[in-house]
């Protein structure tokens, strides 16, 4: 059995978050836009 990689754990966690529906997607988009805003507006 292969060891579980960090990437696999992150993907599993992300997929579980996305399976929660539209509010989760809106939350991820909000985080991404908030995180990119300082770089794009600077």
Image (cartoon, rainbow, N blue to C red):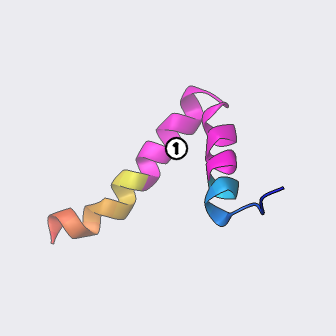
The answer to whether residue 26 is left or right of residue 18 is left
The answer to whether residue 1 is left or right of residue 36 is right
Residue at image x 37%, y 58%? 34
Residue at image x 67%, y 31%? 20
Residue 3 picture location, percent across and down? 78, 63
The answer to whether residue 25 is left or right of residue 37 is right
> Vertical placement of 28 versus 7: above or below?
above
Q: How many marks?
A: 1
> Vertical placement of 29 versus 35: above or below?
above
Furthest residue toward front: 1
Residue at image x 31%, y 61%? 36
Write down the quadrant of residue 10 in the picture: bottom right
Label 1 sits on residue = 27
Residue at image x 75%, y 60%? 4
Judged from the image, the secondary structure of the residue bearing numbered disc 1 is: helix
- Residue range highlighted in magenta: 11-31
Label 1: how many Cα within 10 Å (few below 14, some 14–19, many 20+): few
Front residue of 23/12: it is 12
Residue 33 picture location, percent across and down? 34, 52
Dividing the image into 4 quarters, which one contains the C terminus?
bottom left
Front residue of 14/32: it is 14
Front residue of 23/8: it is 8
Q: Tell me if residue 21 is in the magenta stretch.
A: yes
Dividing the image into 4 quarters, which one contains the N terminus?
bottom right
């Amino acid at each position: 059995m292969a060891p579980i990689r960090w990437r696999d754990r992150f993907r599993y966690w992300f997929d579980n978050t996305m399976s929660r529906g539209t509010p989760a997607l809106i939350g991820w988009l909000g985080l991404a836009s908030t995180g990119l805003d300082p770089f794009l507006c600077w």
